[in-house]
Amino acid sequence: MTPITEVEGRRITLSNLEKVIHPATGFTKGELLHYYATTAEALLPHLRDRPVSFLRYPDGPDGQVFFTKNVPPGTPEWVSTTEVPRSEGPARMVLIQDLPSLMWSANLVSEFHTPQWRADAPDVADRLVFDLDPGSPATIVECCRVALWLRERLSADGLSAYAKTSGSKGLHLLAPLEPTPSVAVTAYARALAVEAQTELPDLVTHRMTRSLRPTKVFVDFSQNAARKTTATPYTLRARAGPAVSAPVTWEEVESCIDPSQLAFHAQDIAPRLQLYGDLLKPLFSTTRAKPLP
């Protein structure tokens, strides 16, 4: 019998709890649901009011992996949705506003990806993002060097940067902004990526061309575009192990000399939240949000 649980008054059907989702550690769907339930207090503010794209991996990372952007069939009527603009016409997407919605969506087995803007102001960003992606044999260690340069460069423009692992190979930098058109944020981020390549030519490329990326860190500025999304803080990733996109301290970035130092999994997050709280909480501070120069 498929179990049904009640979360804050909402009845949710949970399925296949013993199914192994992350095969490297035998991490099951039940453990995945427990992770999201126990991380919800930190995760939900990063999801709330932002249309969610789901990267689904219901049979694990070795099975079919696919994006779901429109409201999935069978979505309960109590799950909030919002209309979002697209080039082909408006569409409806899910908003994860509360714990029942989070647990319903976690049962789909998905990564969570969100834009840099909120549903009430599409195309107007309230944060800036850089996705630092290392080209082999470069690793997150090299990403940390680039992140430190970008932190100082953003600081020179009055912007405060915060870091999280991508949950894959790289690092994400985020900075809170006063509401700014996404097109302007993208242009600013591109200019900084070009500048980073000029200042660190042996370490950085700002171009996506695969042939240019071995040994270097690709400073991807494109996720500031209104139609792009970034892995949400604390989301599990579709990897062999239950890797998490985890906020990190600048001290951890500065001291990183081995990729294992910044490899975090589901079991690491509760102790980190107890120790640090949400390291990305400043992203919600109106006093820290600054205009682009």
Image: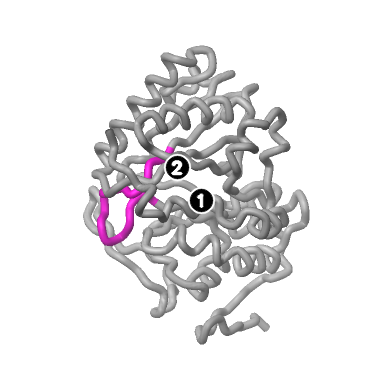
Which callout, 1 or 2, points at the residue further toward the start of the chain? 2
Q: Is residue 184 above or below residue 10?
A: above
Q: Is residue 65 magenta?
A: no
Task: Look at mark 1 in the image and give the residue it sits on.
Answer: 280
Q: Main secondary structure of the magenta part?
A: loop
Q: Position of residue 254 (x, y in %)?
A: 62, 31
Residues at discs 1 and 2 in contact (Cβ within 8 Å): yes
Question: In which quadrant will I find the N terminus?
Answer: bottom right
Mark number, residue 174? 2
Looking at the picture, does residue 36 appear above or below residue 1? above
Is residue 123 within the magenta segment?
yes
Q: Position of residue 26 (x, y in %)?
A: 77, 57
Q: Which sits in the foreground, 292 or 97?
A: 292
Q: Is residue 27 left or right of residue 277?
A: right
Residue pictured at 51% horizontal, 39% vertical: 172
Magenta range is 115-129
Colouring scheme applied when the structure was drawn: one colour
Is residue 146 positioned above or below 57 on the image?
A: above
Q: Residue at image x 51%, y 32%?
A: 132
Image quarter (top left, top right, bottom left or bottom right) of the C terminus = top left
